[in-house]
Image (cartoon, grey):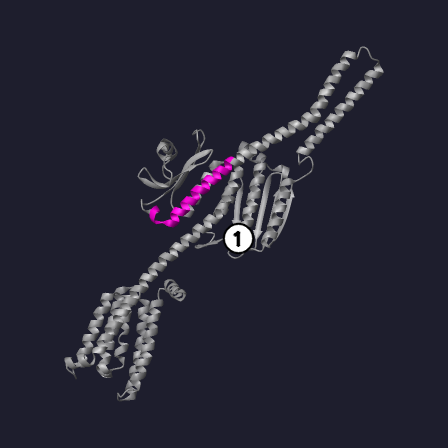
Amino acid sequence: MHRANLVFQMLKKNPSSNLNLLFLYRYTSLLLTSFFYLVGPQPSFVFKVGVVVSLGVVAWVLTNLQRRYMEQTNILKVIVLIELLGLTLLLIPTGGMASAFIWYALNPILVAATLVTPRFSWGILTFYLVTATFIANRKYSINIILEEKSYFYLVCILITLLANLFSGMTKELLQVNGKLANTNEKYQETLEHIMSLYQLENFSPYKSPKKLTEAMAITMKKCLQKDTAFFWVTDHAFQKSYISNETTNRNLEMDLTNDWEYLRKQKDAFTYTHHNEQYWTKVIRTTEYIGVIGVNVSSNTEEEHTFLFHRTFEFLAELSEMMLERIHMDHMMDQLTISEEQNRIANELHDSVSQRLFGIVYSLHSLRVKSRNISTTELEQEFDFLLQTANTTMKELRASIYRLSSVKKGEKPFLILIENYLVEYAKLNDIRIDYEILGEETSISANEKNGLYRIISEACGNAVRHGKCSFIEVTLALEEERTCLVIKDNGIGIQTKTGPMKEHGIGLSNMQNIVHSLGGIFEIGTPYKMGTTIQINIPQEKMQKKQEVYG
């Protein structure tokens, strides 16, 4: 089965392979029939040699002509008829139906059965048998010919029948193999997209369902290979709504809201007809959000008969629910973390600073009451004590601030995070990563830090998974006016079916979206098999504000 598969792959990749097999049979049969013709009882060996040489030259010419015009059926028919007529006439000087070349004359019939049509092959077979019988009729009667040469007619008919059956099966198998190859290609593309979907987890730091709807709509179009898709998300009170609308209907969000009473009753995926367009849709439900995802379909039966389409769509729907739930949970965890931190700071200030401040206030009040009854020396001692207490309180307050602020302590948590990630990733994938980080992290915002970390993670992941690299160089410069990030690798570059850098993957699109959301510029250079270089320039927020003022 495996060898047969290889044959069909060869035939699919090289449409002339069928013709090559026919030509191989042509020259093999010519060699064998010529040998028996030369050793046969026919007179004049020189004449026989001349016939064989001439036949070889004609075979070479006809082979080239058939190879050249194999796609033009009408011209090929003329060539086949000319060859058949010539081989039939060759029977006259070489022995009629006793000629060795009578079997070689089956070549044009086989060509017709394989490259033209079955009807044409049966037609020229009939012509050949009738003509050969007519030539033999000059010496023998029809009855004798039919009686003595019946095996010849039977063999010719069976060979033509087998040739047509083989040709039909080959064409059918090639069509099936082509469909399987296309299905496998789509399956591989879908697998690659699904394997890249883990990048959608990076949307949770943004705490934004809107970002998720945009990414998921693009992902659905790519994975399901559709022209249009949409993803609508809203809270249960319909107060906050987000939609990524890739359709032509600009009022889709309003229409979905109006149809919600109908949509909410649908538990499974279903066909939603909207403005004469059909969408395969499913309702999304989470603890915080509800919504609808959908892609356009051409008919009611498309989604029912395509298992891969159905399973991929269900997977994307479930993933959407998971990501929305995660965004909500991350938001809740952030709120809890902030609340806990606020309580911790309040308790710390209450247990130390506030107690001392209360003591100072109480001492000042007491000192005001008894200041008239104590000496100047005692009053100065009281003031010295209050001053010392105030200084101690200030030191404790400063210590609390230092404990809360990594900047005050001289720490660089973001840069340490980047360094640790690169070191661990290099060890994990057995590659070499050189990095250089310049500047102070205080010059960039938390949003930019998060974006840079995601870009570095994504770029390194792509370099290893897709680029097959063994070396990565990362340079991050945190300048006063801008942030510059350069990531180079020695991999094979970005390539697709249609050539290098024709289509962008989800990971690459994610990086571009992050940079654009930060107001930066994303550039990529990927000479084929010469690695990939990513250059990113992000202006600082204060510089963007200046540009907006003067722009």
The magenta stretch is 303-328
Q: Which of 348 and 421 is in front in this view?
A: 348
Q: Is residue 236 above or below residue 32?
A: above
Question: How far across and down, in percent of the image, does residue 199 sit?
Answer: 51, 45
Question: How far across and down, in percent of the image, does residue 171 sit?
Answer: 31, 63
Q: Which of 70 and 357 is in front in this view?
A: 357
Q: Nearer the viewer, residue 418 or 88?
A: 418
Quadrant in the rendering for residue 144: bottom left
Q: Which amino acid does label 1 sit on?
A: Arg
Quadrant in the rendering for residue 348: top right
* Residue assigned mark 1: 465
Question: How far across and down, in percent of the image, does residue 422 sit?
Answer: 61, 48
Which residue is located at x 54 percent, y 52 percent? Answer: 463
Instruction: Say what secondary structure mark 1 lies in.
Output: helix
Judged left or right of residue 299, residue 534 is right
Judged left or right of residue 453, residue 52 is left
The N terminus lies in quadrant? bottom left
- Principal secondary structure, stretch drawn in magenta: helix
Which residue is located at x 61 percent, y 46 percent? Answer: 421
- Can the viewer see residue 441 in this picture? yes
